[in-house]
Image (cartoon, helix red, strand yellow):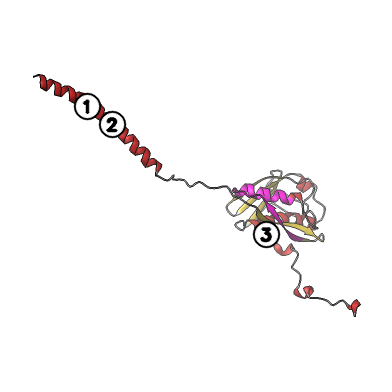
Amino acid sequence: MAPVSRKKVNISLLIPFLVIALFFGVMIREKYRSSHILPDKTVIQPPIGKRTAVLFFVTDGTRLAREARELDPCDDVDACMKDLLEELVKGPVGEFDDPLPEGTVINSVRVIGEMAEVYLNRTFAEAMPSGSSAEMLAVYSIVDTVATNFPQIARVKLSVDGDSKTLLHHLDLSDPIPPDYTLELPPPHPAAQQHIPDRSKQ
């Protein structure tokens, strides 16, 4: 009877050892497996470099003209558009004039489908120079700047001080406005670029 008892004792000692070995084997296998599985979500690298923007300023007091500007990169449409319009508010770096009244502030910007909502402060309306031409140049400097840099935008809704039914002296801003490039300074005619001889040397 003694040998049978000894065999039972050996088996009872072996079982816990096998359980522990199996447990650690499964742990090692899962760890090895997880180290070779790629993550489900791809890590998106932040944008690098500058982005070129086109801003519309006033030339000759009657027309809009384009000026290129280098801006910091961004990856959020609302934030990018607000940064763009804040550059417009800062004014031109070249020989053009400001289209927006001094003190204008871009409070916020929101994109809804093909429409951009631009919320301006009260100064935009109150400090606007008199005359329909000044209003047109100010409004379309914003609208055309947005539409040119964001081709997916078909209309721009301007709200002043949270009022969606804003009325300027000559313009009604109640409805979204599509871009209009007829106010833009046309490119010079090819004939105007021809060389004219200097007759003083003849």
Number of residues whose C-alpha sits closer than 10 Å to that of mark 2, classed few (under 14), some (14–19) or many (20 or more): few
Task: Mark 3 or mark 2: name the one nearer the start of the chain.
Answer: 2
- Identity of the residue furthest to the bottom in this view: 202
Per the image, the residue denoted by label 3 is 179
Percent x, y of residue 84: 68, 51
Percent x, y of residue 133: 79, 58
Task: Mark 2 or mark 1: name the one nearer the start of the chain.
Answer: 1
Percent x, y of residue 74: 62, 48
Q: What amino acid is labelled 1 in the image?
A: Leu
Give the secondary structure at mark 2. helix
Give the secondary structure at mark 1. helix
The disc label shown at residue 14, or none: 1
The disc label shown at residue 21, or none: 2
Visible in this render: residue 119? yes
22 up-or-down from 87: above or below: above
Mark toward the viewer: 3 or 2:
2
Residue segment shown in magenta: 64-88
